[in-house]
Amino acid sequence: MGTVISLLNHKGGVGKTTSAINIGAGMAELGKKVLLIDLDPQANLTISLGIPRQKYTIYEALRGEGELTPYQHKPNMDIITSSLDLSGAEMELINEAGREFILRELLTQVIDDYDFVFIDCPPSLGLLTLNALTSSRWVLIPLQTEFLAVQGLAKIKQVIDKVRFRLNKQLDIGGVIATMYDSRRVLNRDVVETIHKHFGEKVFKTYIRENVALAEAPAQRKDIFDYSPKCSGAVDYMDLCKEILGRVG
């Protein structure tokens, strides 16, 4: 049975989708069978990989209009795509019985086919994110090493603790990923120090350095390993994947 991991941060622009794509791609490079689920109504993961609009996306599955239908993006890496239709899902599902567990039930159809399932959560703490957390064993928190990025840490921890207490006893923080890091900047170093005070050993030793190739890859509809396999971004995400395997694998 595969391990389900959510990537969560209710602040946008912290490298969450970039991390979801490149952790998934890195695990695939390491020979793991990976499923990525784009649970964001903005469909940034789907768009970044250049996947055309599918007949059955995560929206249709959540609505009960179809099963989870993985799209084979490349060897060892499948995608459950998203679409803008997902933006209405929270309102449409609000009266569904057991609405917090819909995704967990859907995952029983495919979980045995994968080593890892990574869920790219929306930048909010609503019903979609709740479904992701209820389905997951671990949460990874990508965190931009800027001042404003650390302001919501207490809220994230509070939400995870509530879900663990009420809905998913197994849920735990697998680690915090420092992204867009530049060791030359005093602010970046100070923010990393603050993150360590909040999370201690939960912070991954691998920091994702600021790297232009990570921003360019989505424009070419590629992950970093297909776009620029020798750049610092690819090196950092491969090191991070190995660290994740050592911690939660």
Image (spheres, rainbow, N blue to C red):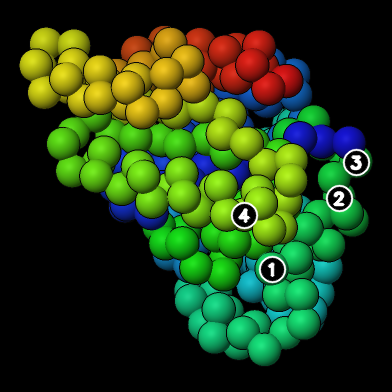
Identify the residue shown where x is 89% and y is 56%: 109
- Position above or below: 135 against 74: below
C-alpha span from label 4 to label 2 = 23 Å
Residue named by callout 2: 110
Q: Which is more foreground, mark 1 or mark 3?
A: 1
Where in the figure is residue 244, as x and y percent of width and height?
60, 19
Horizontal side of residue 189 vs 53, given as left or right: left
Q: Earlier in the sequence, mark 4 or mark 2?
A: 2
- Total labels: the figure holds 4
Please tell me the numbered disc located at residue 92. none
Where in the figure is residue 207, as x and y percent of width and height?
36, 17
Tell me the SS state at disc 4. helix
Circles 2 and 3 in contact, beta carbons < 8 Å: yes
Q: Amino acid at mark 2?
A: Val
Horizontal side of residue 198 vs 81, given as left or right: left
Q: Is residue 225 visible?
A: yes
Q: Quadrant of residue 206?
A: top left
Q: Amino acid at mark 3?
A: Asp
Q: Quadrant of residue 14?
A: top left
Q: Which is more foreground, mark 2 or mark 1?
A: 1
Residue named by callout 1: 100
Q: Quadrant of the C terminus?
A: top right
Q: Earlier in the sequence, mark 2 or mark 1?
A: 1
Residue named by callout 3: 112
Closest to the observer, 62 or 82: 62
Q: Which is more foreground, mark 4 or mark 2?
A: 4
Please tell me the numbered disc located at residue 163. 4
Q: Amino acid at mark 1?
A: Glu
Q: Amino acid at mark 4?
A: Val
